[in-house]
Image (spheres, rainbow, N blue to C red):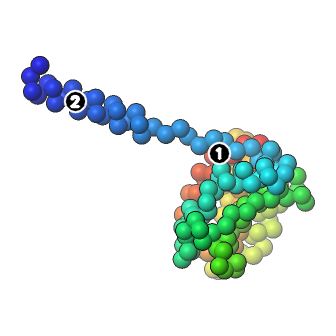
Amino acid sequence: MTPNRKVGVLVTALMVSITGCSQEKPPESVSIGKAAQSDAEAGKACASLLGDGTGIAKDLMWSRTEPAQLSVKAYADTSTEGVITCTVADKADTDIHASLRFANTITALNDRINSVSYHDSETETHVTATNKDQGVGVVAGEIPTQATEALQKTLDTMAGRLRR
């Protein structure tokens, strides 16, 4: 084998090796119906969707975005069937928080959108994303208007993982 051929084979093998390793398994889907059955199941869903909350904190441009500075809480909404709430909060300043409501039906999602859009103003708005194939979605209210684009991308990604 000539030296040039050896290099070509080595480069090809390296490329196959690198591309094979970089293919991550897609995140698992999250059943909102199952999550809405209990606070424990809601907690599992929120952990899967939000992780340690740093992504949401960064999207919202909070000054404190380290995992140790944030808390993620979850509960199944007993007032509406098929709804869970995930809250990310700054541990040192409870006024800094974001609540994401995940709904198992478009009707329940629209109810949540109506309740959060009531607080829309010049400086704050709501962001929503749906998985129309599954009839589920997520809404976040009281979002600083300058953070909506980043949060929209995050919610769109989350919505793609949701199922009934």
Q: Is residue 142 visible to us here?
A: yes
Q: Residue at x 53, y 38 (%)?
A: 25
Q: Where is residue 120 in the image (x, y as percent from the top left)?
A: 71, 75
- Answer left or right for 17 relative to 90: left
Q: Residue at x 90, y 60 (%)?
A: 79
The answer to whether 97 is drawn above or below residue 157 in the figure is below
Q: Position of residue 30 (x, y in %)?
A: 70, 44
Task: Give the Cα distance between marks 1 and 2.
Answer: 38 Å
Q: Which residue is drawn at 61% across and 53% down?
A: 156
| Residue type, label 1 | Arg
Q: Which residue is drawn at 80% across and 59% down?
A: 75
Res 91 quadrant in image: bottom right
Name the residue carrying label 2.
10
Q: How would you rate the neighbour count of disc 1 (Cα within 10 Å): few for under 14, some for 14-19, many for 20 or more?
A: many
Q: Position of residue 154 (x, y in %)?
A: 58, 57
Q: Nearer the viewer, residue 50 or 146?
A: 50
Name the residue carrying label 1.
161
Q: How would you rate the neighbour count of disc 2 (Cα within 10 Å): few for under 14, some for 14-19, many for 20 or more?
A: few
User: Which disc is residue 46 wearing?
Assistant: none
Q: Upstream in the sequence, badge 1 or badge 2?
A: 2
Q: Position of residue 130 (x, y in %)?
A: 69, 51
